[in-house]
């Protein structure tokens, strides 16, 4: 498979879901911000190109979709307006893509004119994911996407992530709950104090009796 993301100690290939694991404060968000260009802690290659010197907007334009922690929709905008505002596509294609997102995410399609602040947590998370998918990214970054969500919403979210990966998108999923993330990932990378302390297949990590200690920095 084609390597989409490479930071030296972290790689993600096209069509692969990689779980970025660690306790709160382990450095998961820092890794996401480094990939996006908000930080310059380490060299980054995206889609075969060294982007270390590129600013955030140039990196995103190459094909990154980002779902930040706590979702962060434009609270005063409607569902449709949020989707439109997140896209760089030409107007006609953007409108077509909005229709596709509303059809794919039925809980959004039922409330296209609702203001984002009126949505439930699950609806806001699906809106955040739909926004990130508007421009058909090649790499999708998700920072703690299950935070505060009911199990049924998490199951729906993860089913969608599997389908996105099957279509060829590389997915990097940051998560504190290791067993949850490793349930859909092919590989996992464990962080502690900002360092990679373990990288292995999902099945190996799930079977590792020391995983909890590694994630806690032990």
Image (cartoon, rainbow, N blue to C red):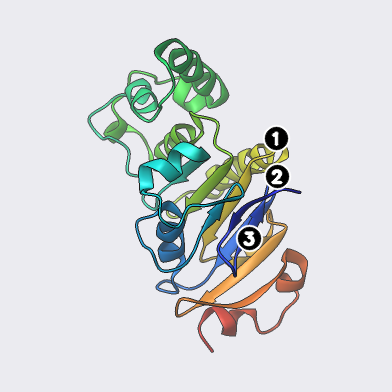
Where residue 210 appears, as percent x and y from the top left, is 66, 84
Decide: is 134 above or below 33.
Answer: above
Label 3: few (<14), some or many (≥20) within 10 Å? some
Q: Which residue is the extreme one toward the left?
A: 76
194 left or right of 201 in image: left
Residue 145 visible at all: no
Q: Report helix, strand or loop for mark 2.
A: loop
Residue designated by label 2: 15
Give x and y (percent) for residue 187. 70, 62
Query: Quick one: 195 or 108, which is closer to the camera?
Result: 195
Residue at image coords 61%, 68%: 189
Q: Where's residue 90, x and y in %?
A: 42, 16
| Disc 3 target residue | 11
SS category of the residue bearing label 1 = loop
Check disc 2: other Cα within 10 Å, few if <14, some if 14-19, many if 20+.
many
Instruction: Mark 1: give few (<14), some (14-19) or many (20+) Cα within 10 Å.
Output: few
Look at the picture and state if 147 lies above or below 21: above
Nearer the N terminus, badge 3 or badge 1? Answer: 3
Query: What residue is disc 1 on?
Result: 167
In the displayed structure, would residue 191 be above or below residue 106?
A: below
Identify whether 86 is placed above or below 216. Answer: above
x 28%, y 27%: residue: 115
Cα separation, mark 3 vs mark 1, equals: 19 Å
Marks 2 and 1 close (CB-CB < 8 Å): yes
Q: Which residue is at 68% across, 53% downward?
A: 184
- Residue 60 visible in the displayed image: yes
Where, by quadrant of the figure, is residue 18 drawn? bottom right
Q: Which-is-in-front pick, marks 3 and 2?
A: 3
Query: In the structure shown, which secondary structural element does the residue marked by tag 3 occupy?
Result: strand
Quarter of the C terminus within the rendering: bottom right
């Amino acid at each position: 498979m084609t390597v989409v993301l490479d930071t030296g100690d972290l790689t993600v290939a096209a069509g692969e879901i990689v779980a970025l694991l660690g306790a709160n404060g382990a450095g998961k968000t820092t890794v996401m911000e480094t990939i996006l260009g908000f930080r310059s802690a380490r060299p980054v290659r995206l889609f075969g190109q060294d982007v270390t010197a590129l600013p955030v907007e140039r990196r995103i334009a190459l094909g990154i979709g980002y779902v930040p922690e706590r979702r962060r929709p434009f609270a005063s905008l409607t569902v449709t307006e949020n989707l439109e505002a997140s896209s760089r596509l030409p107007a006609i294609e953007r409108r077509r893509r909005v229709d596709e997102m509303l059809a794919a995410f039925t809980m959004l399609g039922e409330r296209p004119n609702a203001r984002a602040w009126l949505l439930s947590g699950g609806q806001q998370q699906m809106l955040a994911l739909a926004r990130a998918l508007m421009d058909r990214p090649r790499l999708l970054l998700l920072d703690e996407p299950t935070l505060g969500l009911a199990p049924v919403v998490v199951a729906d979210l993860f089913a969608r992530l599997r389908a996105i990966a099957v279509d060829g998108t590389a997915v990097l999923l940051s998560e504190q709950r290791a067993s949850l993330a490793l349930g859909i990932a092919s590989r996992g990378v464990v962080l502690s104090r900002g360092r990679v302390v373990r990288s292995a297949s999902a099945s190996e990590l799930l079977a590792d009796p020391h995983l909890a200690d590694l994630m806690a920095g032990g």
